[in-house]
Image (cartoon, grey):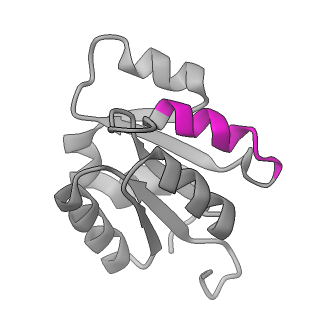
Amino acid sequence: MSSTSGRNQTVMVVDDSDDVREVAALQLRMSGYDVIEARDGQEAVELARQNCPALIFMDIQMPGMDGLTATRLIRNIRELCAVTIIAFSAFGSGGNRERAIEAGCDDFVSKVAAVNQLPAIIERFLPPA
């Protein structure tokens, strides 16, 4: 699951909305990335452990295990502690950005911006696919 350059180009999209995951995954695949999809925080932790993605887009508000808890757990896995995690949420205010950064996310973007600009956001953290 890596590009021909030898760099890991696997991106995980974590969101409880099937529509958001599908749109994001399609856009990422069209931009040349391998994509893993997770429906909640628990699944994200398990799939991250199994696949070691280079970057994770993490919805922070999900039923069951939320994205902040999942981020903290991922940061405690030695093999994954350096993975780039970008929090995204439909709610940009109310301290979500600060809580995401405190939980260990590398950045925070609004869900609208993320879905429309995924490749550009990723390129700030990973070389192009």
* Residue 5 x, y percent position in the rendering: 66, 82
Farthest residue toward the bottom?
4
Q: Which residues are magenta?
A: 68-78
Between residue 73 and residue 12, name the one nearer to us: 73
* Residue 110 is at least partly visible in this image: yes
Q: Is residue 75 magenta?
A: yes
Residue found 65% across the figure and 38% down from its top: 73
In the displayed structure, does residue 112 sit left or right of residue 58? left
Query: Which residue, as the protein is rendered here, is positioned at the far right?
Result: 78
Give the quarter of the image for residue 62.
top left
Q: Nearer the viewer, residue 89 or 125?
A: 89
> In which quadrant will I find the N terminus?
bottom right
Observer-nearest residue: 11 or 50?
50
Q: Is residue 106 visible?
A: no
Q: Residue at x 50, y 75 (%)?
A: 129
Residue occupying the point 32% across, 68% down: 25
Residue 37 on image: x %, y %: 41, 65
Tell me what residue is drawn at x 75 percent, y 38 percent: 76
Q: Give the residue furthest to the top.
A: 94
> Which secondary structure class fits the magenta region best?
helix
Q: Position of residue 24 (x, y in %)?
A: 28, 62
Give left or right: position of 46 versus 56: right
Residue 104, magenta (yes or no): no
Q: Nearer the viewer, residue 80 or 47?
A: 47
Question: Taking 64 as reference, is 100 above or below it?
Answer: above
Which picture quadrant has residue 29?
bottom left
Q: Is residue 40 above or below residue 13?
A: above
Label tally: 0
